[in-house]
Image: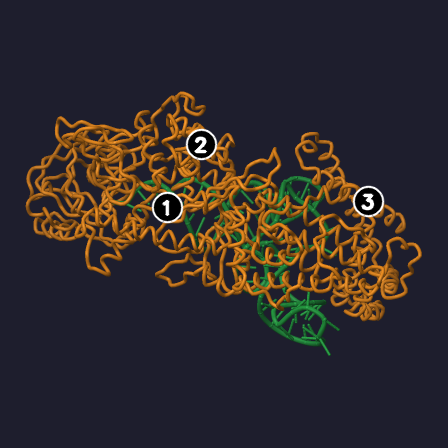
Chain colours: A orange, B green
RNA sequence: GGGUUUAUAGCUCAGUUGGUUAGAGCGUUCGGUUCACAUCCGAAAGGUCAGAGGUUCAAAUCCUCUUAAACCCACCA
């Protein structure tokens, strides 16, 4: 047997263990030895962006997903966790542009599309490799043979197919509308990609011309060059007489007509109560303009500079310069009434932080409000994609954990506008549309999977990265050899891996519920007529120790790889998962991971003790015979923790499972049974059975812990004489452990009870002592207490444990406690006698009466619950049994109380 | 403006359909430790479960209001 070091050193073993796992092939479900009727379990890894390295967000998602994957694999399911990476169009392109500018002082235009794309692809490839290495470092048991990338040929095929299908159904259209334009990225953004930042701004109040009847207020005077109307609230009496009138004005760049229209949403109390309508540069104004059939003047161009429509004096100026110039002109003309300081919620690009310029542009949109009927699709019967996406969650085809996010999801969908999917960036999936005579009157358009024959020019734009991510759960499962399939439908339906669809769980952070989860639901229900996943588990975000978001500018970014280097992967994983609840943000800091490391080392030392103490190391898989009360006790506790852990993991309560396991491992096994085992092994008759129990408990414990801390458990497992990796062992079953032993009832009543009794005695003494401190009337008993307390201190407790250990369960009757336990018992009795003399009988009577009331009420409610047929049917057996046990307990308590009450009388 | 969440020990957080005396980790104090583990062991101190009211035999848990904080959506002309 090899020597076991005193402390667990993760650095020395982790990489080798990962290699062993990977080489075993068990990450691939095809290689698992499964029962014929084995259910499947699948997770699609949310693909990390190929923009650099892993961060804590990735680390936490990998920890959760690996936990579920390993648990289900141990449960004997056909388990697939499919890894991959995302090209992350805008994010990656922006990053490479930045590097290019810093290193070579060049822009993408200096390089040209082809050369630039080559650079981006090189960067993405490099970045992908790094990420894959880091995903391995986290211990992720994902199937690398199925790894995918959003720009893979196969995935690109699905993307084109999706576009064409949606186009054919009339859900995708090209239109000239107001879009969110980022002048820095030179591209459109979807509504979700716009963020807001509060900034100081100036509110200018001015008149369009001297003879214009009233003033308007704005923070963006330069856009007013494109105004075509003024909107007022229809209830506003001040402006009633002007409604419908048209005024001709001249802002220094020619004649302009301003119509006075009404609009409900105009706030009469803001500014002058009159809103200058700029249809081309505000989404709301655009909608007002559409209602009133107003013309549209585009005064700001895609480059963020003023257009010729703004007038000769302004054309080519930046927005800021145009503003200064126009403000100066207004003042010169005496039109400016006042300038005030105000706050403004500036819309900015979520990727580069530049100010967004809403402007009209010809783009591709997904229409969310168009009703369609699709053949062979159970969801789409004269429904909109928005309605279907709502329906599948409302009807619980898809369950979101925690549930409250379902509301958030509904709200988002209810407010959803058409989704702009074309982007003017180079890196991404090209839009599968080809033109002839583009932009001319006789323009021809072709939407299809391949370029048509002849002289066609492809649309130069690319698709929103979320358009391809939305297909992720199934585009990754489709056969790479798509050419072997006759039709697209055939490919979709008959790719062998589609057996893993819908994926069982979607695990991700709540921050991308809209960006991604919602899009997957929209696109999958449309294309497959099926849901993408059955359950969505949303984890919280990782914050620093002060609760702040991690950001580069704050310099508080925690690198998970640093923590792994310092404490080991297992320590990091257990730290991230324990002490949290679904959807709640958590904090990550050294001390927390240190706690994880300490636990991992504790487990290491527990096994080090067991492996070096037992006479013969071997795997004990079958429940061994018990010879002492302590043996029974530890096995009963093990059964309890098995059932708790299993139930918790099945109901996504990961933190609870870790807590239960930790409590069992540290408090029950290490602090009690291991100490008892030392004593038991001094008795030659008990050595063999004790060893077996130690090895049995250790074996089961390693399986239970494996999903949380895979490396250390596998490493310890390698010391047990097992032929197979821990990775593919069988999850212990509570029911099986109990089978044939007939111990189920016995354990609660006979085995655990005496031990609990002992714990209870210790507790009683402690409580009494606390009472004496505050209640001088009980002083009388202090001497007795202190006498007994001395005995109950550390040494006496060990004595008591020894007594329990010596107690042969076959000789319970004969065994006579000759030490502390009996003294303590007697002591407690004595105390109680003394206390009785001190109790106010009237008060005590009242107390007991009210308690009887309470217990009777409890019994009533329990009986009601057990009579409820639905509850008995639906609830798991263990829960019902627990309730029955409670009822029994309470009835006993009631009897006791009633007796007490009688004795008082 | 619409919505959601949070407030529990010094700190970070659990607490499952209401049910024994509200828990854990870290920290603090005291004591211990050669023989699995100082990455250890034993013990102690520390809580009006934000506040007020209500429902109930029973409330950290359910309802109403108040206070404080965070987040999401809309929008700021």
Answer few, some or many: residues within 10 Å of disc 1's Cα (few below 14, many 20 plus, some between 14 and 19): many
Q: Which of the pair A696/A386 is nearer the observer? A: A696
Circle 3 sits on which residue?
Answer: A894
Q: Which of the pair A25/A608 is nearer the observer? A: A25
Q: Secondary structure at mark 3?
A: helix
Closer to the chain start, of discs 3 and 1, is: 1
Q: Residue at x 49, y 31 (%)?
A: A394
Badge 1: chain ID: A
Q: Quadrant of residue A102?
A: bottom left
Labelled disc at residue A180: none
Disc 3 and disc 1 in contact, CB within 8 angstroms: no
- Disc 3 to disc 2, how far (Cα)? 64 Å
Badge 2: chain ID: A
Disc 1 and disc 2 in contact, CB within 8 angstroms: no
Q: Secondary structure at mark 2?
A: loop
Let me know if marks 1 and 2 both belong to one chain. Answer: yes
**Horizontal relation, residue A78 to residue A257: left or right:** right
Circle 2 sits on which residue?
Answer: A495
């Amino acid at each position: 047997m090899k020597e076991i070091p005193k402390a667990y050193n993760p650095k020395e073993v982790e990489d080798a263990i990962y290699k062993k796992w990977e080489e075993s092939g068990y990450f691939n479900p095809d290689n698992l030895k499964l029962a014929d009727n084995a259910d499947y379990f699948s997770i699609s890894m949310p693909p990390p962006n190929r923009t650099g390295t892993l961060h804590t967000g990735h680390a936490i998602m990998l920890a959760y997903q690996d936990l579920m994957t390993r648990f289900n694999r141990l449960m004997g399911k056909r388990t697939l966790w499919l890894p991959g990476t995302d090209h992350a169009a805008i994010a990656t392109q922006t990053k490479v542009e930045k590097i290019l500018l810093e290193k070579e002082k060049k822009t993408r235009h200096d390089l040209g599309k082809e050369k630039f794309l080559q650079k981006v692809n090189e960067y993405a490839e490099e970045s992908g490799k790094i990420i894959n290495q880091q995903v391995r470092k986290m211990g992720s048991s994902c199937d690398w043979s199925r790894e995918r990338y959003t720009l893979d040929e196969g995935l690109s095929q699905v993307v084109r197919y999706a576009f064409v299908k949606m186009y054919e159904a009339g859900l995708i259209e090209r239109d000239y509308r107001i879009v969110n334009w980022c002048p820095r990225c030179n591209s459109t953004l979807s509504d979700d990609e716009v963020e807001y930042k509060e900034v100081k701004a100036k509110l200018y109040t001015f008149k369009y011309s001297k003879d214009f009847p009233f003033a308007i207020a704005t923070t963006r005077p330069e856009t007013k060059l494109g105004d075509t109307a003024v909107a007022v609230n229809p209830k506003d009496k001040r402006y009633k007489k002007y409604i419908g009138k048209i005024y001709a004005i001249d802002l220094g760049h020619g004649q302009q007509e301003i119509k006075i229209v009404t609009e409900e949403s105009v706030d009469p109390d803001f500014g002058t109560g009159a809103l200058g309508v700029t249809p081309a540069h505000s989404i709301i104004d655009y909608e007002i303009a559409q209602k009133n059939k107003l013309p549209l003047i585009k005064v700001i161009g895609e480059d963020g500079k003023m257009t010729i429509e703004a007038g000769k004096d302004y054309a080519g100026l930046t927005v800021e310069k145009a503003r200064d110039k126009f403000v100066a002109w207004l003042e010169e003309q005496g039109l400016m009434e006042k300038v005030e300081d105000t706050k403004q919620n500036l819309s900015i690009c979520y990727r580069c932080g530049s100010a967004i310029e809403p402007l009209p542009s010809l783009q591709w949109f997904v229409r969310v409000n168009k009703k369609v009927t699709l053949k062979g699709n159970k969801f789409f019967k004269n429904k909109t994609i928005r309605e279907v996406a709502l329906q599948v969650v409302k009807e619980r085809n898809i369950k979101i954990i925690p549930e409250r996010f379902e509301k958030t999801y509904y709200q988002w969908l209810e407010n959803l506008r058409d989704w702009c999917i074309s982007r003017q960036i180079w890196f991404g999936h090209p839009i599968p549309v080809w033109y002839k005579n583009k932009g001319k009157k006789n323009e021809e358009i072709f939407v299809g999977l391949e370029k048509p024959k002849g002289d066609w020019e492809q649309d130069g734009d690319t698709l929103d990265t979320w358009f391809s991510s939305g297909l992720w759960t199934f585009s990754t499962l489709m056969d790479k050899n798509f050419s072997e399939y006759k039709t697209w439908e055939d490919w979709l339906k008959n790719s062998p891996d589609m057996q893993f669809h819908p994926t069982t769980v979607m695990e991700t952070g709540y921050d991308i519920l809209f960006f991604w989860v919602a899009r997957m639901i929209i696109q999958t229900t449309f294309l497959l007529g099926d849901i993408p996943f059955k359950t969505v588990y949303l984890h919280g975000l990782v914050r620093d120790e002060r609760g702040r978001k991690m950001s580069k500018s704050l310099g508080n970014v925690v690198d998970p790889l640093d923590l792994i280097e310092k404490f080991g992967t297992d320590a990091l994983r257990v730290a991230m998962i324990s002490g949290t609840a679904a959807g709640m943000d958590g904090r990550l800091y050294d001390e927390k991971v240190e706690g994880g490391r300490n636990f991992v080392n504790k487990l290491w030392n527990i096994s080090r003790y067991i492996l070096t103490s037992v006479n013969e190391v071997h795997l004990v898989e079958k429940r061994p015979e018990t010879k002492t009360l302590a043996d029974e006790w530890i096995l009963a506790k093990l059964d309890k923790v098995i059932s708790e852990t299993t139930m918790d993991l099945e109901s996504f309560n990961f933190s609870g499972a870790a807590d239960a396991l930790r409590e069992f491992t540290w408090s029950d096994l290490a602090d009690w049974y291991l100490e008892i085992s030392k004593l038991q092994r001094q008795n030659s008759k008990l050595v063999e059975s004790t060893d077996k129990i130690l090895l049995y408990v250790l074996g089961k414990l390693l399986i239970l812990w494996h999903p949380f801390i895979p490396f250390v458990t596998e490493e310890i497992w390698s010391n047990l004489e097992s032929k197979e990796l821990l990775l593919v062992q069988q999850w212990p079953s509570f029911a099986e452990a109990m089978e044939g032993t007939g111990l189920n009832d016995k354990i609660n009543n006979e085995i655990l009870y005496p031990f609990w009794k002992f714990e209870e005695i210790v507790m009683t003494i402690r409580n009494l002592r606390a009472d004496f401190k505050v209640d001088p009337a009980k002083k009388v008993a202090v001497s007795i207490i202190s006498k007994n307390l001395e005995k109950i201190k550390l040494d006496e407790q060990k004595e008591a444990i020894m007594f329990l250990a010596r107690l042969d369960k076959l000789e319970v009757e004969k065994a006579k406690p000759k030490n502390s336990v009996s003294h303590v018992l007697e002591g407690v009795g004595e105390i109680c006698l003394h206390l009785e003399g001190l109790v106010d009988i009237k008060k005590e009577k009242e107390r007991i009466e009210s308690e009887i009331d309470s217990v009777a009420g409890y019994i009533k409610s329990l009986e009601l619950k057990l009579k409820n047929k639905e509850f008995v049917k639906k609830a798991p057996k263990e829960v019902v049994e627990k309730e029955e046990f409670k009822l029994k307990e309470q009835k006993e308590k009631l009897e006791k109380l009633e007796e007490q009450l009688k004795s008082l009388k």
